[in-house]
Image (cartoon, rainbow, N blue to C red):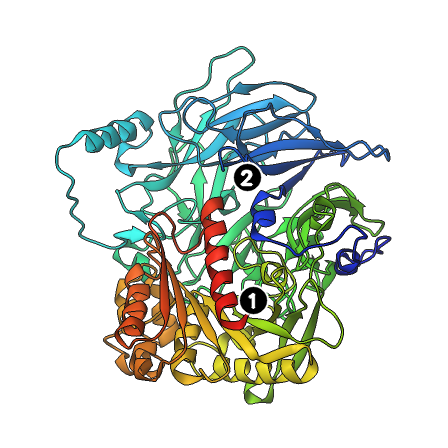
Amino acid sequence: MKLRYALLPLCLLTAMPSLAAERGFDVRDMVAMDRFSAPLLTADGGTVVFAKRQLDSASGKAGSSLWTRNLRTRDIAPPARLTPEGWNVNSAALSADGGTVYFLSAKSGSQQLYSQSLQGGAPRQLTDFALDVDSFRISPQGDRVLFSSGAFQGCGSDLACTRTRLDKTAAAKHSGQVFDSLFVRHWDTWNDGRRNTLFVAPLPKAKEAPVKGASAISATLAGDAPSKPFGGNEDFVWSPDGKSVVASIRVAGREEPWSTNFDLYQLDATGKRAPKNLTAANPAWDAGPVFSADGKTLYYRAMKRPGFEADRFGLMAMDLASGKTREIAPAWDSSADGATLSADGKTIYTTAQHMGEHPLFAVDVASGKAEKVVGEGSVSAFEIAGDTLAFTRNSLQSGDQLFTTSVSGGQLRAITPSAGEMLPDVKFGEFEQFSFKGWNDETVHGYVVKPWNYEEGKNYPVAFLIHGGPQGSFGNGWSYRWNPQTYAGQGYAVVMIDFHGSTGYGQAFTDAISQHWGDRPLEDLQKGWAAAQQKYRFLNGDKACALGASYGGFMVNWIAGNWNGPWKCLVNHDGVFDQRMMGYATEELWFTEWEQGGTPYQKAANYEKFNPVNHVADWKKPMLIVHGQLDYRIPVEQGLGAFTALQRQGIESKFLYFPDENHWVLKPENSVQWHDTVNGWLKQHIGQ
C-alpha cells in the first residue's frame, strides 16, 4: 500500500540549498506565508478544491479563499481562484455530484451558508438565520443542511429567541452575572449560557430566498454539539437515508468539567423523536461517527479510561441492529485521529502520530492490519475519491503543501508550493532524529535542527525546546507558534526531546508521565541533552537556553529549581507555577485530576510533589515569562506569580503580557512581537 515516491523526500528537497539562498527563516516570513489546507475531491477524483489563507500586509489581517485544480491535465497551469476577491470563506464541502461547493462566510454581516458552482460565478446565500452558522453538513440527498449554532437551548427551534436574549443582555445597565455551576469559563470565553446546538433546515430551491427557520434536534440534550472549544463537523454525521443524525455529545450535568464521557447519540432529523444513546455502555470518550454506505454499521473512535483525555482512541464498529461493538485493530498501538471509509467499505484511512511523525495509515476492517500509506512528515488533512488521494503534509522545513496521488501507489503531484519554493532566498536548517536510553533504560527520541548558516567544525548556541501537552510531541512537523526554524534562522541550533509522556511511541510511553511530571520527563531531558551534545559536536553546551510553553512552561519552572546548571537563560510561556492553585483555577478539571491522581484536596501530596512554587528559593537563572490574559487553561496569575518570585529575589527577568491572547499567541503582529522578544532574550544571554 505504501506509495512509490517519484519525488525526493520532502526533508531532502527542502534541505538542498538554493543558489539564491542568503538568509535564515524569520518570523515575518512565517506570518506572511500563504497557508494551504482542507483538500476536497470531486466524486470522480478529477478536481481538487482547497483553501488558501493569505495575509493582507496593509491591514495585518488574514483571509481565506477557495481554489481549484483540474487533475486530469498535466500542464503547469497554477490552481485557479474560485471564490471572489474580498470574500473570507471557510469550512468548504462539495455536493454529491461535485458540481457545487458549499462554504461559510460572514459577507452578509453574520456567518451564513453559501453555495457556488464549481465552474465559477457569484456565490449564492442559502441561509439567513438570526445566529451564526458555526459548522455544517449537507444531507446525502442534498435537500437539507445540518448545522450547529451557539443557542440558548430553552429557545428550542426559535433562533431569533437567542438573538433577542443576547441583545437584551447587551443593553442592560448592570454587568454582573451569577453562576451556580461550572464551567464558569472555558478556554478563552466566559459562559453566557449558550450551548452548541444542532439544527436542520431545508435548503432553498433555485431562485428562492435564503432560509430563515430551522428545527432544533439536539436542544433536549444538555451538552454541546460539537464539543467546545475545538469541536467541528467531525463530531456529527447524517445517516445515509437522511432520516437521522449521530453526534458525539457529553451530557454530564454538574460533572461536565471533570468528565470525558462523550457518547454517540442518534438524533431524529425532524427533531420529533427522543435522542438515543448508542454508547451508554462506555463511560469514556466516543467520537467521530461514520456510517457504512448501507447505514447498517457505525464506525467511530473510542477511549477506554474515563477522565483521561490522552487515552488511546481505538477504531470501533457497531452493528446498529443489535448494538454489538468490536474494536477493529486492538493490537495497533496508535491513537486514531479519525475514520474515513473506502468506497468498498473494506478499509479505514486515518492519520495517527508515529515515532515523531504523523503519517496516513490504511487499516483493514476485517483483520485490523494497519499499513502506512503516506509518511515522511506530518499529514494534516486528506481526502479520497475512488483511487485518487489528496492530502496536505508539512515537515520541519515546510508548512502544509498539497499533493495528489493514487491510493494504490503512484507518483506524487505537488499542487501548491513548499515553504522553500515560496521563499527562494531562505535556507532552512537541516534536521535529524536521534535516540538514546532515557528513563527506565527505555528508548527515547529527539530531533536536532542545525542553524541555517551551519558550517562544519563550528559551534553554535542552542535553543532547547520543551513541548507542551504534556501528551504532545515536537517532531517532524511545522508549527506557526513553536517553529524550530525561527530559531535556526537566527543562527541557533535546536534540540527537542520527546520525553516520556509524548505521543506517537505507544500508549504505555504516553501514560508514563501521569503523576510523574517532574521526575521521568526530567530524566529524559537530562539524558537527551547529554546524548545530543555527545552526538552533535556543533552544539555549544555552554551557550544554551531552555524554552517551553504550557507543560513545557511548567518544566521550565521546574528546571529553574531542579536543573538550572546548564542554562544561561529560560523562557516560560503560559507555564504552571503552582500545581495546587492550578488544580482549582483551571477549567477542564479532568486534566489536573487525572495527571495528579485526584483533586487537590484528596491528593494534596501529589500536587506538592512536583510543584515549582516549592523550589523558588533555588531559582538563579534569568527568565522571560509570557502570558495571555485570556488564558483560562493556565490562568495569567500563574505567570504573574513566577515573575513576582523572580523579581522579589532580584533575578533578571521580564514579563511579556498579552491582554488579547489566550493560551496561544495567534494574532500576526503579536506573534512577531513574541518572537522578537524571545529572540532578543536569547541574543542577550547566548549571543548569535
Q: Amino acid at mark 2?
A: Ser
Q: Is residue 263 above or below residue 438?
A: above
Side (left or right) of 153 relative to 308: left
| Residue annotated with mark 1 | 473
**Upstream in the sequence, badge 2 or badge 1?**
2
Q: CA distance from mark 2 to mark 1?
A: 36 Å
| Residue annotated with mark 2 | 239
Q: Is residue 225 above or below residue 282?
A: above
Is residue 304 in view from this perspective? Answer: no
Question: On residue 688, which mark appears?
Answer: none
Q: Residues within 10 Å of mark 1 (few under 14, many from 20)?
A: many
What percent of the width, then of the height, locates residue 466? 51, 70
Is residue 282 in view from this perspective? Answer: yes
Side (left or right) of 72 relative to 191: right
What percent of the width, then of the height, locates residue 299? 58, 52
Front residue (pair 448, 182): 448
Q: What residue do we see at 56% from left, 52% from top?
A: 27
Q: What residue do we see at 79% from left, 60% from top?
A: 12
Q: Amino acid at mark 1?
A: Ser
**Quadrant the N terminus occupies:** bottom right
The image quarter containing residue 79 is: top right
Front residue (pair 578, 412): 578
What percent of the width, then of the height, locates residue 653? 36, 69
Side (left or right) of 615 relative to 412: left
The image quarter containing residue 87 is: top right
Q: Residues within 10 Å of mark 2 (few under 14, many from 20)?
A: many
